[in-house]
Every structure is written in C-alpha cells, then in structure tokens.
Image (cartoon, helix red, strand yellow):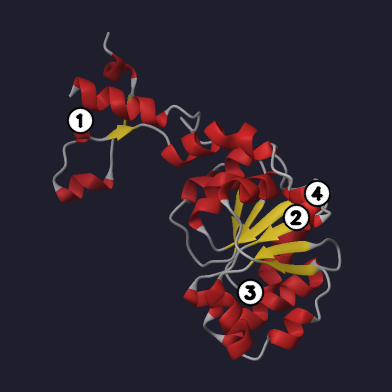
Amino acid sequence: MSGTANLQRLPSYPSRREGVADGKVHLVGNVMIDTLLKNRAKAERSTVLDEMGLVPGGYATMTLHRPSNVDAAAALGAILDAIEVIARDLPIVFPIHPRTRKNIADLGFRSRVEALGNLRLVDPLGYLDFLKLNANARLVLTDSGGLQEETTILRVPCITIRENTERPVTCQVGSNQLVGTSTRAILAAYERIKTGQFDQFGIPDLWDGQAAQRIARILVEA
C-alpha cells in the first residue's frame, strides 16, 4: 500500500464548488505546527522569562493589531476595560505592534495604558523568545490567527478578541474562546480560565509535526 493511500482524504470540501476533484484534496496537518515543534526545544533555552522577571504560569500574553480592534475608540476602549480587570490578577505582557502603539496615542488612550502598572508594553519579539513567552503563559489574549493555532499545540488557553476566526478547529477542540470585543464577553472567558473550566482540550488531527513529510510524499507520488 502506498504512503498516499494511508493519508486522509477529505470526503467533502469547499473546493468542490471551485471544480477541484475530491481526490486532489488531502488532509495533511499544519506546517506551522511542524515549525513550532521543530523549534520547541530551542525556544526553551530562551532567557526571556528571566530577563522580564516572569514566573511560568504567572502572567498573560497579549497581542492586538487588527484594524477592527485598534482603529476605533469604542472597540479599543472596551478591550482596555477588560484588560484593566484582568491586570489586577496577573501581569499582561503586550508585545505591541507599532501601528497599535500609534493608535493608542492617537485615540487618546496613552495615559490610560501607561497607568496600568501590570500591563507591560514591550517591543515585538523574535520567534523563539515569543514562543517561550507564550508556552509559559497562563493564558493568551489575541486577535492573531497564528497564535490561536500555537496556543492549541502549547496547551495554553486562548481568548480570541475577534468576531470570527479562520481557525474554527481551535474552538472545536476547546483550546480557544472566540469572544468579540465585548468587555463582558472577554471577562466571562477569562473567568472560565481563572476558575479552571477551560484547561482541558484536544489537539486537531495530524497536528503532529509531520505535515511537511506528508505533503512531500503526495508530491513525489503524484
């Protein structure tokens, strides 16, 4: 039996509407997870936690950059309302996008953000440092698509501050809560994590670090 025969094929897929035959669509996994798992040990050697004075499990990580979240005062203000509450419990490390930093100032939130002693704004981090930071966080707040996937494989609860996601599988396996920008919804998601209601979740099929090998095998055998 060939390697390709052992691979999963999707029985039904939206590509049908584009005229792509089912036999040409293969479920292979996630190459971004390949990268993460390949670099996990190297990332663990990062000294970023020591440099920031952080204790594993004793802080949250946040990223925020999407226009829907940072371009409008109403949305950004609602998010900050929630962050103020969460920051009373634990430090929040915020590697801040330059555009987000600019909008915080332009929308009149600079003094409010600076007054949050437990919200630590830092410059964007390199991949390995950022991986170490997220792997040891109690939770991650984000509007990033990639982080929804990374937190799933790292088994770190994720709160996604968006109205929709291109990574619905992360919600299906229970690692990710999609909450929008409502202060109440963000805090409700945080409460579930805080009280241990959101610590058990699965890993999507084939997120095992072997996606690239499956792709290569399909291409060779095509």
Q: As drawn, which residue projects farthest toward the top?
A: 1
Residue 188, image x, y percentages: 72, 64
Q: Which amino acid type is marked by label 1?
A: Gly
Q: Which amino acid type is marked by label 2?
A: Arg
First of labels 1, 3 by sequence position: 1
In the displayed structure image, the side of residue 139 where residue 74 appears, left or right: left
State how far apart marks 2 and 1 are (Cα).
42 Å
Give the residue pinned by disc 3.
Answer: 182
First of labels 2, 3 by sequence position: 3
Which one is nearer the viewer's eye here, 42 or 12? 42
Task: State yes or no: discs 1 and 3 in contact (Cβ < 8 Å).
Answer: no
Q: Quadrant of residue 104?
A: bottom right
Give the residue pinned by disc 4.
Answer: 50
Category of crowding for the residue at label 3, using alpha-carbon neighbours closer than 10 angstroms: few (below 14), some (14–19), many (at least 20)? some
State how far apart marks 1 and 4 are (Cα).
50 Å
Q: Quadrant of the N terminus?
A: top left
First of labels 2, 4 by sequence position: 4
Secondary structure beneath dot 2 equals helix
Which one is nearer the viewer's eye here, 68 or 180? 68
Give the residue pinned by disc 1.
Answer: 23
Q: Which amino acid type is marked by label 3?
A: Ser
Q: As drawn, which residue projects farthest toward the left?
A: 19
